[in-house]
Amino acid sequence: MERFRTRTALLALTAASGLLLTACSGGADTGDGSKAADRHDYSAGQPAPAEGQDADERDDLREDPDHLSTFALDVDTASYDYARRALADGRLPDPSTVRPEEFVNSFRQDYDRPDGDGFSVTVDGARTDDEDWSLVRVGLATRTTGRTGERPPAALTFVIDVSGSMAEPGRLDLAQESLSVMTDRLRDDDSVALVTFSDEAETVLPMTRLDGNRDEIQDAVSDLDTQDSTNLGAGVETGYETAVEGLREGATNRVVLISDALANTGDTDADSILERVSGERREHGITLFGVGVGSDYGDALMERLADKGDGHTVYVSDEDEARKVFSEQLPRNVDLTARDAKAQVAFDPETVEEFHLVGYDNRRVADEDFRDDRVDGGEVGPGHTVTALYAVRTEPGAEGHLATATVRWLDPETRDPHEETGDLETDALDDSVWNASRGLRTTATAAYFADALGRGDHDLPDAPRLDELADHADDLADSTESEEIRGLAEAIDTANRLM
């Protein structure tokens, strides 16, 4: 698959003349679009409504189905891992927990990597057997992970659920073993704090440097024991208070929440819990990393917490996954290469009749807010890839430019904005999804699987039956000899039998 040459532009912080930016982030666009009549300017970023426009006019503009699609970047993977856990337990996942972008982003991609901070952009696609419909993939990648000593020090506050439900094997015991391994692998100049919560929350270890204190930290982890109910609100509040008290300048300050997210005591209102996370993030820049555990799991609450805390979520169900998260993913996420990252895809109205972004339902951003750096985006670290998939219907016989994808982010140190773009032409589309590159076939397989588990809510063209999809996944696993794709094939096969 052809990779498209990208170009970089360092942008000034001053707003361009005539571009009126708005600080409102509450009204996201639909992310779907159709051909806009007489629209020839398909550059990324459109002017916001003029100051003084009423709310109805602003909403009408945001809901106008045009040629742009804008979203905040997301590297969550919890939805896919939790679906696999449900299938392994012999049940289909609740469709409400199926987020296709998290299925798609659960697989490594071989996108080109940039030399420094920020992103590379790859755009490719393939035609389907549905007339004039194609799948278009937008791939973003950060630089590879540097040596451990190159990242800034970490100040990590672990907020650990010790409620009665965490006594189930594979919950607290898994967290303790994982934390123990991670404590051994953190650097001497890193710091950790421990907060536990059940009926109430307690700081069992204030922010403590690893250097000379590893035994004390290991003892605190070993002494964790389950108690009663789940006062998640108290845990979040105390966790952020502890993180603020131990705030370290020049370090990556992060709260790591380990829980089944089944709040049943104290403040169980998601919005008020979320507001605490959001306020601390805005004031102190403390981000949240959510680790979900347990066969019964409050997926929606954990995902919303991470979104509000400018972080992301993972789900672990066994020792191998936990070691990967705490020994590889979490240390990697200590460093940041981009803040408030957003993507905008501009489909050429001369060649594209209709398009749909697959997933990212709660990450949509109003098109006019793309270049408003006051509007939250996603925080992304080194070694990450982000993939977005679109179903695109082209004009019959269309030829020429199809789409331009632009990613915008802020430098994690200076907060200067940067952009990178990539393009796709119609003649670069592969003739068939199933004969395309390994990466695009993997993306399509994962998306079709999510669509099936979500009961077809994502409107993908030429969706195969689940047994046919299982065959495609088996062939892909055989040809790539990839363990993660083999796991996907097995999950599809299990779902096919259960259905």
Image (tube, grey):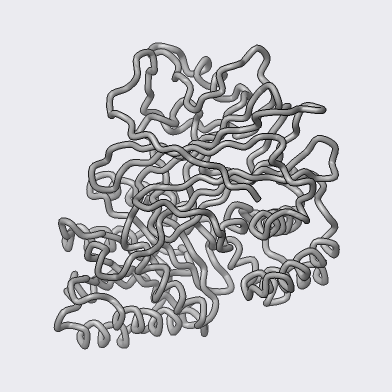
Residue at 34% in and 50% down: 117
Rendered-image quadrant of the C terminus: bottom right
Q: Image height check: is 247 above or below 370? A: below
Residue at 27% in and 58% down: 240
Q: Image height check: is 298 above or below 19? A: below
Along the horizontal axis of the image, is 240 left or right of 173? left
Which residue is at the front of the view, 407 or 259? 407
Along the horizontal axis of the image, is 491 left or right of 204? right
Which residue is at the front of the view, 314 or 35? 35
Q: Position of residue 9 (x, y in %)?
A: 38, 34
Residue at 66% in and 19% down: 36
Which residue is at the front of the view, 226 or 107? 107
Q: Position of residue 176 (x, y in %)?
A: 38, 82
Which residue is at the front of the view, 227 or 61? 61
Viewer can see residue 273: no
Q: Position of residue 238 (x, y in %)?
A: 27, 62
Along the horizontal axis of the image, is 167 left or right of 488? left
Residue at 29% in and 83% down: 184
Residue 80 lies in quadrant: bottom right
Residue 197 lies in quadrant: bottom left
